[in-house]
Amino acid sequence: MISSEILKTENLVKKYGEQYALRGVNFSLQKGEFVSILGPNGAGKTTFVKIVSGTTKPTQGKVTIFGKNIEEFPEIKKKIGVLSHDSFFYRNLTGRENLEFYAKMVGVAPDRVFKWAELFGMEKNLDKRFSEYSRGMKVRLGLARVFMNEPELLLLDEPFSGLDPAGVEKTVEVIEKYRDRSYILITHRLDIAVRLSDRIFVFERGKVTHHFERGVSIQELQEIFK
């Protein structure tokens, strides 16, 4: 039987000096699955995404993506879309120029730029410089970039930060439209985690402390963070 597991971490540890960011995290993600990671600031959520995406190396442990070690097969990164706290956009270029530059890098036709910008409500702001964008506009441009080459695995770190209610709903609708992908979502929005997730993990002090299946209520999650 062929496994549908596309991501697995084993005893993942990350230390910065004497400080632990992750303490032996074991995690798996199945093809087409949507998993949310919740937890307080400093719980290790962003560090986890950085390691899984290959931008940071673990101190200890193993990451397997699509059946391969990401450190040995860096080409795997082409199958992963990452929205992080760093925008990776050029401040003096327009939104359009930034997306077209990225499209060229990943082999996406330039005419696809407008499609993804429109999906995230950025079509009227593409010709403004990135430096002129609000926080929410920067996030939406980042989402257009992440989805543009239609990666198999999407790692979304706080994609609703800075968005107004309409922007949040539009982003959720795009995710729901493309639910054939696999997702890891880091968020503080319990309502969205419950709405979208097949499973929910809670990180605290670098460890997985809770694990929920689909059907968990917002009230149950709120009890953890009291």
Image (cartoon, helix red, strand yellow):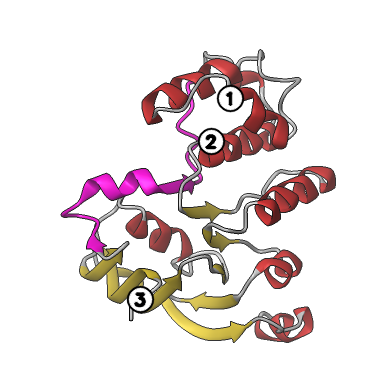
- Secondary element type, mark 3: loop
Q: Is residue 77 magenta?
A: yes
The residues bearing labels 2 and 3 have C-alpha atoms spaced at a distance of: 27 Å
Examine the rendering and report whether any part of residue 91 can be seen: no
Image quarter hosting the C terminus: bottom right
Splitting the image into 4 quarters, where does residue 133 fall?
top right
Q: Are marks 1 and 2 in contact (CB under 8 Å)?
A: yes
Whichever of callouts 2 and 3 sits on the residue coming sooner in the sequence is: 3
- Residue 29, percent across and down? 44, 71
Say which of marks 1 and 3 sits in front: 3
| 78 relative to 192, above or below | above
- Residue 212, percent across and down? 60, 84
Q: Which residue is mark 1?
A: 113
Q: Amino acid at mark 1?
A: Val
Say which of marks 2 and 3 sits in front: 3
Q: Amino acid at mark 2?
A: Met
- Secondary element type, mark 2: helix
Q: Amino acid at mark 3?
A: Ser
Q: Residues within 10 Å of mark 1 (few under 14, many from 20)?
A: many
Whichever of callouts 1 and 3 sits on the residue coming sooner in the sequence is: 3
- Residue 180, percent across and down? 57, 58
Q: Which residue is mark 2?
A: 148
Q: Which residues, given as a range, are shown in magenta?
A: 68-91
Whichever of callouts 1 and 2 sits on the residue coming sooner in the sequence is: 1
In the rendered view, does 220 fall on the left or right side of 62? right
Q: Which residue is mark 3?
A: 3
- Secondary element type, mark 1: helix
Q: Are marks 2 and 3 in contact (CB under 8 Å)?
A: no
Q: Which mark is residue 175?
A: none
